Amino acid sequence: MNDTRVVITGLGALTPLGNTVADYWENAVNGKSGAAPITKFNPEKFPTHFACEVKGFDPKSRLDRNEIKRSDLFTQYGLYASAEAIEDSGLDLDKESPFDMGVIWGTGQGGMGTFEDEMKNYVKNDFNPRFSPFFVPRLIPNMASGLISMKFGLMGPNYTTISACASSNTAIMDAFNYIKLGKAKAFVAGGSEAPITEATIGGFTAMKAMSTRNDSPETASRPFDPERDGFVMGEGACALILEEYEHAKARGANIYAEVCGAAMTADAYHLTATHPEGLGALRGMRLAMEEAGVNPEDVDYINTHTTSTPVGDISETKAVSKLYENSSSRPVISATKSMTGHLLGAAGAAEAVLSVLAVKNDVIPPTINTKTIDPEIPKNIDIVLGDARETKVDVSMSNNFGFGGHNAIAMFKKV
């Protein structure tokens, strides 16, 4: 591909650790847990009673009444985070060509809350077809990207990526490639998810994928620990402004980091499980590094996908270990899902924000709750446990993997 450079000029966050980027970063660096008992519904009928919910969300602070009325919660989250990112970027949209500004947005399931509510109402009304006229627009997964473009008048490429828990990393990669191809000057890219509903929690608990540590929610997500028993559900949205470097430089933009590489691969292995040897993940990381023009020893930090599941944690660390098998340095990793929970389709964007800020601030957020390292975890890996680590971070990598075998990797470096 050509030599066009792509940089990050704006960030937005609405997460279980804070409703702004500043709060999100502060709480992540300080090792705070976002887990607590579920408040959105009574979870007693399910084995898991807790999740990482967004706290104190007030859509009226950034959205108008009509936007709230016609949108599912996952879209409201996306609009909210995108507003912060655009404001943070300093882009004066009145001075930009709307056709040079696009939106690529990821989600894993879209408007599940809307679907659940409408079907309950349908059954309650003796099967009289009294669906809301906003049912379909609130439900469909592409509506977040559509409404973000409408709110800000962005008329460039606009679509939604759906690759399960790799969705928003896929969105970031696509925005990166579109800018390099000259299709736009800037994108709002990221993802949102509102999965703390009865159907979603019920479905994942039926799969036995989630932790049932109801007596201690805040310590339930414990990646790499031999006592881990599943992931903790999270929700929210994060947005990044990806911008062509010369365009950002010409307007004097604040640049957080450069997007230097990205890749996708498939495991082609199992419906929900990652490849046991991490072959797809390994190939993806190698391709991303090749595009970035770096070697393993040049990567200062890897934000792993690690969700605190018995199988997934092992396969990813095996892949990372193999990546460094001919390197003189040890990979430095952390699993920030230990604090945020797993935001499904928004996970990639949430972890990309932390990976970008690690490069910007030379701080690696920690993995919390892990007391002992599983003996199956390869020994050549340096896991940042307990406390954040202040160290030089010139290059970071963010991994995300999804049901269906989707692997998406994004890389960032100092400018």
Image: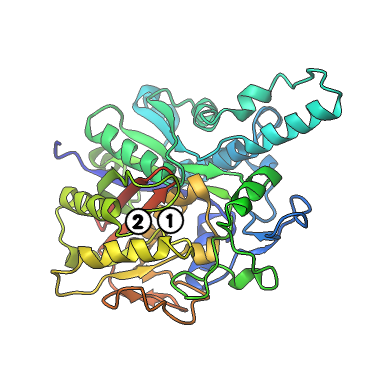
Mark 1 neighbour class, 10 Å CA radius: few under 14, some 14 to 19, many 20 or more? many
Residue at 36 percent of width and 74 percent of height: 376
Q: Do the residues labelled 2 and 1 touch (CB within 8 Å)?
A: yes
State the residue in front, 43 or 218.
Answer: 43
Please state which amino acid type lies under the numbered disc 1: Glu
Q: In this view, does 148 lie to the left or right of 42?
A: left
Q: Which mark is residue 351?
A: 1
Q: In this view, does 156 lie to the left or right of 226?
A: left
Mark yes or no: residue 303 visible: no
Mark yes or no: residue 386 visible: yes
Compared to 377, does 9 lie above or below? above
Report the number of discs.
2
Tell me the CA gap for discs 2 and 1. 7 Å
Per the image, the residue denoted by label 2 is: 398
Callout 1 secondary element: helix
Callout 2 secondary element: strand
Residue at 59 percent of width and 69 percent of height: 220
Residue at 61 percent of width and 46 percent of height: 195
Compared to 135, does 192 lie above or below? below
Please state which amino acid type lies under the numbered disc 2: Ser
